Amino acid sequence: MDKEKNIMLVGDIMLDFAGSTGLTDPDRAPRRYLWTDAFAVCNFLELYRCSQDETWLELARQLVDQVHHVLGRHRDDGQTSGWLSGLNEQEGELHPTIGGLRIGKRLPERAPEEPADERLEWDRDGQYYHYLTKWMHALSCMTRVAGDVTYLRWGMELARTAHRAFRCAATPEGSTALQWKMSIDLKRPQVRSAGLHDPLDGLVTYSELRSLAGDFAVDGLPELGEEIGELAEMCRGKSLATDDPLGIGGLLCDANWMELLVIKGDFQHLRLFRQVLDDSLASLESAGDGFLELPARYRLAFRELGLSIGLRGVANLARLVVEFQEDHDPDLLFELTPRIEALTPHLALVPKIERFWREERNKGTEHWKEHRDINMVMLATSLAPEEFLQAG
């Protein structure tokens, strides 16, 4: 498929998504889900970038507004109403993310007196740190494309709130980590385990926010230096390798954003950057491509498409060689070049994943139907990833 046909398909997918989830169809109740919507915002912005059709930019604005008014507020079936922050209506409109954003799961969150149920927890509402970082990135993209620093301010306010709420002491010695899942009001953990990549996602995303803030002469934006320092410490000495396709894709996306920030001079954690490249390669080699031989009923499209999106970022990493040649340490260039070259052959997975999930016959499984929104939106991102993979 050539780029023009990809863009046409992405446009069709995103118009269908806008109608079926209640963004543009007034007869449908809004069906918002934070992870999917973060990718969707970037897809609308990519369609705008390619066409300069203001319709796409307006859809991105509408989606941000609807997410904030649905997921930034308490559930309709709960005992509490209003903004998650507890602010009054007027102040909440000005600071819609300062209380965090709900995941958008179909079931209410686990009440304080309810026993934990690991299986059921996947369907319960609450707040996920790694969903919040994806939304921060989407808000950064909004500011970069629309030139409106309000979105950046909301992203930075969300960053400070998330860090304060999810940060916890993980060991008797006092080392810190991030809780995996918090309650809707951010007052109690729902799942106490720590996400493998959450500190890295936070470090990269917070660095992106701070970098973008440096491009705007605006007073009063939140400072994130302390949070960035703590997140860097959480990443120190931790293996990030994984055999989960979505996790590998996330690592590769982080590497892509690190590269852009390094080139800009806004990311100084070069040892961590090298480690992410090494762990990404080790993960790809360990996971292999055997999953491609399985029938659709045994596969989760959005997890594979997450890998495909991350691999799309590998193509961007090759730019590092050119950008570093004149202005950066040749020893660093010498270390990074073979790592990037070793990752490049894995790009062959991208067309295989995309072709499989474009086929209508592979969309008839219960797995596909259950996750249709996220599957279609992430397929669109893989087909046209440029805006999602931007940073700073």
Image (tube, rainbow, N blue to C red):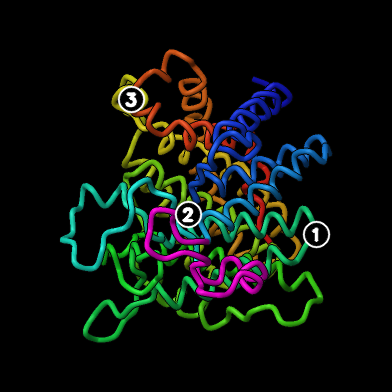
| Residue tagged 1 | 147
Identified at 36% across, 30% down, the residue is 289
Q: Residue at x 48, y 37 (%)?
A: 374
| Mark 1 surroundings: few (<14), some (14-19) or many (≥20) residues within 10 A | few
Residue 347 magenta: no
Distance from disc 1 to disc 2, alpha carbons, whole Å, reads 32 Å
Q: Earlier in the sequence, mark 1 or mark 2?
A: 1
Vertical side of 358 occupied by 213: above or below: below
Is there any visible trace of residue 25 in the rendered image?
Answer: yes
> Within the image, what quadrant is residue 151 found in?
bottom right
Do tag 3 and tag 2 residues touch (Cβ < 8 Å)?
no
Image marks 1 and 2: residues in contact by CB distance under 8 Å? no
Q: Residue at x 66, y 52 (%)?
A: 390
Q: State the residue in front, 346 or 100.
A: 100
Image vertical order of residue 49 relative to residue 151, above or below: above
- Give the position of the N terminus as an image quadrant: top right
Q: Which disc is residue 280 wearing?
A: none
Q: Position of residue 112 (x, y in %)?
A: 24, 68
Query: Counting residues from the N terminus, which is met first, the one under dot 3 or under dot 1?
Result: 1
Of badges 3 and 1, nearer the viewer stands: 3
**Mark whose residue sits in front, 1 or 2:** 1
Disc 3 residue type (three-letter): Glu
Q: Which mark is residue 277?
A: 2
User: Badges 3 and 1: C-beta atoms under 8 Å apart?
Assistant: no
Tag 3 residue: 366
Residue type, mark 2 in image: Leu
Q: Quadrant for the C terminus, please.
A: bottom right
* Extent of the magenta region: 73-99
Mark 1, secondary structure of its residue: loop
In the rendered image, residue 92 lying in the magenta stretch gets the answer yes
Q: Is residue 27 above or below residue 200?
A: above
